Image (cartoon, grey):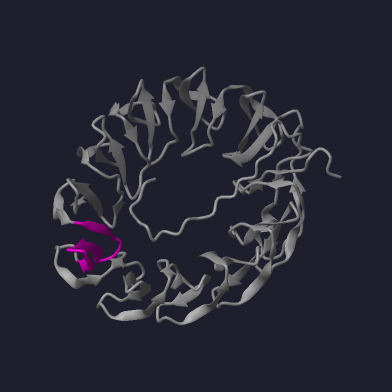
Amino acid sequence: MYCKDADARLWKAVCRIWGSRVLWSVALAVLCAALFLPSVQAEAVVKVSNEYDHVYSFSNGLARVEKNGKYGMINKKGKEVVPLKYDSIQVFSEGLARVEKNGKYGYMNPSGKVVIPLKYDDGKGFENGLAIVAKGEKYGFIDKKGRVVTKPKYKEILEFVNGFTLVRGFNNKFGYVNSSGREIAEPQYDEPIDFEAGYALVKKNGKYGFINGNGQEVIELKYDDAYYFYQTLAAVKEDGKWGFIDAKDTMVIQPQYDDARSFFEDRAMVKKNGKWGFIDQEGRIAVALEYDKVYRFEDGLAIVQRDGKEGFVDKNGTEVVPLKYDEVHVFEEGMAWVELDGRSGFVNLAGEEVVPPQYDYVDYFQDGLAEVGKNKKYGIINKAGEEVVPLQYDYMGQFQDGLTEVGKNKNTA
């Protein structure tokens, strides 16, 4: 999804590329209910035939399987309940999975029954009770009964964010549709920018302003640049400097900064004389402007960088996690992934190094667990740093429905 938010930290995407048709000696490992409790006792395995070229994670009780380019589904007993006849099957979203065959798309329920015929030229997953479908090159919406809600007429429809979706017309301009499928603003704006806090930042003829949920332009398109209303104030650029306005277009904090971002958790990033810091909503300096880079506050802490090292500060500017790491990542479930000298570990919200940097690869915590890797072997740790699943797998996916796919190469003992 497009968003005009340069302060959003880019999350690291890790891709492991395997040769085609890797033979799995595996497959679908499930860390049962006990695995999501503080004390982990066992690892259960659902055996799946190795005749498949790939086995995917479970969703709505079914897992996609692929062989020779054709897709079907198996249940948690390993039984094939949807035959290998589709060119693609998407994961379930809101109880339906998109399926494709011979270039046509439709939708299947968790019983494996096609409930919306394969008659569309494209289709996306359901969201807010609606799915994007195409007839020819024109896109619109259908509901879960297959009824047309918005007649296909757009060149592109993006995903819903905060109750609205961006649509692109064949004039290459952008408009907005609400969660009921009603167009509130026809395609007319130059940039695709999502709704936040009840307003959308829009651009036309080189100037920025704001519209509300009814499509009305409530703040005139007159600013040289601007950022969202995350809270009560939005950052705007006027005559080369950045200040902050409220929803009535009153300039609450006068333009004075070389760069700025809108408020998030009552703090706004601002830059002056080449250095970044934070101000509060009264315009007072909350975190000194002394950093080379800063990122917005999340859960009361912000990532900051100085002289190539990163750490975290609180809202008063106290360095809670010292700036000694090569890279730090946002907190998830009270744990932040940190990197030092090519190794990764975790710190907690108190700044304590709970898991010293020792792994070649780590992922974010989910339900108290995180995938880790060392020497191309993968396992799982808990928040105490204990390896509850030994580092023995050549591949490990992400958990869905309490299951994750794991794999060992054919020649792995």
Query: How far from the left and from the top, in percent, is residue 168?
Result: 29, 35
Position of the C terminus, as image quadrant, is top right
Q: Is residue 355 above or below residue 119?
A: below
Q: Is residue 84 left or right of residue 162?
A: right
Q: Is residue 230 left or right of residue 367?
A: left
Residue at point 24%, 40% (across, down): 175
Quadrant housing residue 16: top right
Q: Residue furthest right?
A: 413
Q: Can residue 213 be seen by looking at this rendering?
A: no
Q: Is residue 99 above or below residue 163?
A: above
Residue at point 22%, 67% (across, down): 241
Residue at point 70%, 35% (across, down): 19
Q: Is residue 93 left or right of residue 220?
A: right
Residue range in magenta is 224-245
In magenta segment, residue 254 = no
Residue at point 26%, 32% (across, down): 169
Query: How far from the left and from the top, in percent, is residue 218?
Result: 14, 54
Query: How far from the left and from the top, in percent, is residue 105?
Result: 46, 23
Which residue is nearer to you in this view: 134 or 108? 134
Query: How far from the left and from the top, in percent, is residue 342?
Result: 65, 63
Position of the N terminus, as image quadrant, is top left
Which residue is nearer to you in this view: 330 or 294? 294
